[in-house]
Image: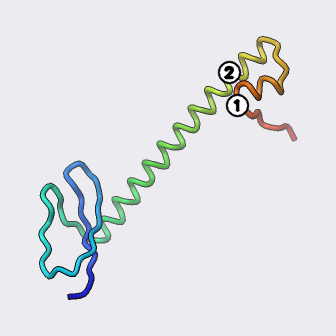
Amino acid sequence: MALQTLYYESTDGSLQTVETTAENPATPQGWTLIDAETYAAKLSQWQAAQDQKNADVQAAETAQKKAAYDALIAANFDPAVAQTLSGYQPPTGG
């Protein structure tokens, strides 16, 4: 039999692909066989959620660095020193 790709979703929402030449492969326990289109849609949703999570983490880190920078400036630190200590790069004026 030719190589075929099977798409699975687990009860917890995890996704998995399996390539096999078996004629009637058994579905692993706790997994449901899904079609390629459903797999692609669910994978896309997962990737979008991961991208949003990463953006949220980056925004929180930037906010924390800016707060440290602002506190250092309020304490009369030189802006260059405040940037170095906080890790915050203020936007450049143009």
Above or below, 57 relative to 42: above
User: Vertically, is 73 above or below 18?
Assistant: above
With 93 as the anchor, is 86 left or right in this view? left
Q: Earlier in the sequence, mark 1 or mark 2?
A: 2
For the point 23% across and 48% down, which residue is it?
12
Q: How far from the left and from the top, in percent, is residue 61?
A: 59, 32
Residue at the image position 32 percent from the left and 70 percent from the top:
37
Of marks 1 and 2, the one in the foreground: 1
Up-down relation of residue 54 to residue 73 (above or below) = below
Mark 1 element type: loop
Give the residue type that dot 2 points to. Answer: Ala
Residue 22, above or below 13: below
Q: Is residue 44 left or right of residue 90?
A: left
Instruction: Using the image, tell me which numbered label, if any, was put on residue 50.
Output: none
Picture disc at residue 68: 2
CB contact under 8 Å: marks 1 and 2: yes
Q: Amino acid at mark 1?
A: Gly
Residue 23 screen position, x and y as percent: 14, 82
Which residue does the numbered mark 1 point to in the structure image?
Answer: 87
Kindly identify the residue that appears in the image at 25 percent across and 87 percent down: 2
The residue that appears at 83% across and 27% down in the rendered structure is 80
The location of residue 78, given as percent across then percent down, is 85, 20
Is the residue marked by circle 2 packed among few (<14), some (14-19), or many (20+) residues within 10 Å?
some
* Quadrant of the drawing holding the N terminus: bottom left
